[in-house]
């Protein structure tokens, strides 16, 4: 059975604190959603700001494969008429094939927030829906606070839906606006709605928020009771605790319950969609997001890793490739030899019986504050150095770092290093923005004449984390360096009570690794 996906990332999603999308951003996300088979894309509220009005104008000129664009707005104002209602006319001007009208279904909101009568609210719903049906639009009617309103006065809440259906609404969307409903309530109330609208051609939709961490569960409960449209956002972006996250909802509906949402090929790009929208929204992807997070299929415990080496699905709820994710073996002090072997094989390296030795070194270093989980480059170096015939491309022998502040002058940093390449011994010195930058510059200065390829290696991120923070300034800093060459990236780590020493270890690995990978 087909379930229609209605995305409101561009409207409800941007209600999230700190999230703002330009018109350009919105158009990029629109194209991606269209490509991945999302059926409806709610572009914004044209009555609320000029940016949304510009989006609707530009999206009209953008050819889409299949998605239908929806403009969002409220029913006409109390006591007015659709013809001269600014908000309604902004929706007309948006010229979208779909109009989504939000109206009140709760007597609390009708009488105490809107301060109008129950009868006038019904007239507002009926006239607004009929107005857009007469213009030939597909109309989704969003019944705001429907579940809460139903609990207050079920008859009235149902009469708002009946009014919308009689006026010709194509979809009745039951909204859990405050996000506090529970799945069994959503299921029971959706069942009643379905019985009430009976054989009407009107579809039922569900729009949930995540205030009780149940938005996905609530949407699924409604689908199991006959809702055929699910409204949510990519990555669950939205006001307060967020909207229903379409990503796990699509995966659950399709992989667990056998509904059809998108094609298997589109489903295999779900991880890409999640990352793409996060990147445009300028938000960090959630590593622990269900289905698509980097850690969603990461295995750390030795017993788990030993088991998946035998039967891959023994510790995985689905095959990660179905949603474009991948299995990952994490290396840490909790690892068994199996983890080490599998991770090395993923890197194309062979341990030739050195598993125990490498594991011993990992455990030793982790006890000093290293962390290999996020530093796969340093893990790779441990494995490579464990080979009996390993020849290091260089050796860092000594270093000094001077940080100086004299009078009112700026603080300066100078590093000198002694490096051996083959039989040749070099002394170099360099200044930097800070001590680590100076050290990096001095090491590169010594190595570049021998390894000109290092000119392409960039340091892209440098993070310091304090472990055992309760020790104050005597606590151990852990340094994580991320380096890049073209599209290739690697992370390396070091830990020491001395932050320069920790950085030195991470820098060493970060520069040695690219020489070995060739
Ligand atoms: Zn909402």
Image (cartoon, rainbow, N blue to C red):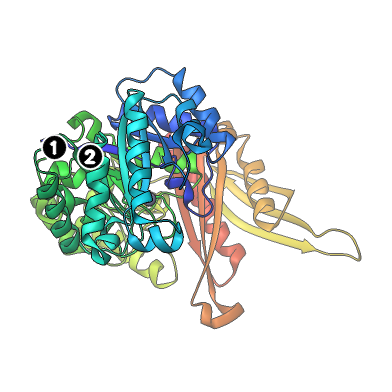
Q: Residue furthest right?
A: 407
Residue 200, numbered label: 1
Q: Whole-percent x and y of residue 59?
A: 46, 24
**Mark positioned earlier in the residue sequence (1 or 2):** 2
Residue 159, numbered label: none
Q: Whole-percent x and y of residue 213?
A: 30, 62
Between residues 123 and 20, which one lies in front from this camera angle?
Answer: 123
**Image quadrant where one finds the N terminus:** top left
Residue 185 horizontal side relative to residue 93, left or right: left
Residue 55 horizontal side relative to residue 386, left or right: right
**Residue position for label 2:** 165
Going 73% across and 52% down the picture, which residue do you hit? 433
CB atoms of marks 1 and 2 within 8 Å = yes
Going 51% across and 29% down the picture, which residue do you hit? 55
- Mark 1 sits near ligand 1, with its Cβ under 8 Å away: no
Q: Whole-percent x and y of residue 128?
A: 37, 37
């Amino acid at each position: 059975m087909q379930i229609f996906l209605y995305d409101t990332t561009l409207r409800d999603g941007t209600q999230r604190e700190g999230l703002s999308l330009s018109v350009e951003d919105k158009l990029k996300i629109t194209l991606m959603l269209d490509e991945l088979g999302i059926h409806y894309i709610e572009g914004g509220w044209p009555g609320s700001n000029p940016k949304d009005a510009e989006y609707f104008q530009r999206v009209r000129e953008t050819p889409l494969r299949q998605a239908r664009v929806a403009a969002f707005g409220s029913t006409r104002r109390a006591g007015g008429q659709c013809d001269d209602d600014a908000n309604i006319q902004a929706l007309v001007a948006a010229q979208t094939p779909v109009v989504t009208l939000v109206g009140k279904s709760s007597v609390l909101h009708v009488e105490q927030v809107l301060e109008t009568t129950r009868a006038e609210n019904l007239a507002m719903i009926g006239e607004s829906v009929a107005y857009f049906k007469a213009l030939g639009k597909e109309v989704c009617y969003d019944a705001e606070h429907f579940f809460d309103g139903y609990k207050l006065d079920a008859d009235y809440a149902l009469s708002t839906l009946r009014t919308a259906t009689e006026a010709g609404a194509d979809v009745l969307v039951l909204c859990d606006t405050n996000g506090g409903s529970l799945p069994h309530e959503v299921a029971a109330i959706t069942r009643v709605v379905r019985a009430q609208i009976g054989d009407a051609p009107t579809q039922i939709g569900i729009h949930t928020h995540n205030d009780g961490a149940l938005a996905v569960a609530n949407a699924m409960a409604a689908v199991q009771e006959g809702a055929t449209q699910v409204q949510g956002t990519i990555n669950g972006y939205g006001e307060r605790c967020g909207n229903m996250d379409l990503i796990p909802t699509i995966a659950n509906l399709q992989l667990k319950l056998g509904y059809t949402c998108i094609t298997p090929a589109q489903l295999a790009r779900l991880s890409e969609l999640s990352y793409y929208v996060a990147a445009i929204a300028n938000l960090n992807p959630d590593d622990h997001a269900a289905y698509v997070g980097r850690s969603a299929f990461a295995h750390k415990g030795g017993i788990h890793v030993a088991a998946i080496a035998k039967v891959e699905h023994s510790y995985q709820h689905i095959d990660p490739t179905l949603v474009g994710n991948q299995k990952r073996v994490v290396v840490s002090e909790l690892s068994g030899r199996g983890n080490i072997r599998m991770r090395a094989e993923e890197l194309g390296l062979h341990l030739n019986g050195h598993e125990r030795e490498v594991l011993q070194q990992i455990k030793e270093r982790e006890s000093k504050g290293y962390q290999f989980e996020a530093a796969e480059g340093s893990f790779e170096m441990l494995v490579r150095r464990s080979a009996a015939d390993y020849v290091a491309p260089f050796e860092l022998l000594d270093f000094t770092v001077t940080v100086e502040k004299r009078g009112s002058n700026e603080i300066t940093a100078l590093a000198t290093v002694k490096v051996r390449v083959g039989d040749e011994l070099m002394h170099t010195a360099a200044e930097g923005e800070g001590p680590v930058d100076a050290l990096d510059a001095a090491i590169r200065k010594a190595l570049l004449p021998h390894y000109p390829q290092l000119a392409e290696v960039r340091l892209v991120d440098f993070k310091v984390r304090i472990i055992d923070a309760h020790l104050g300034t005597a606590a151990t800093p852990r340094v994580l360096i991320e380096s890049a060459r073209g599209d290739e990236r690697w992370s390396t780590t070091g830990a020491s009570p001395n932050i320069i020493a920790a950085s030195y270890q991470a820098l060493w690995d970060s520069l040695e690794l690219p020489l070995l990978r060739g």
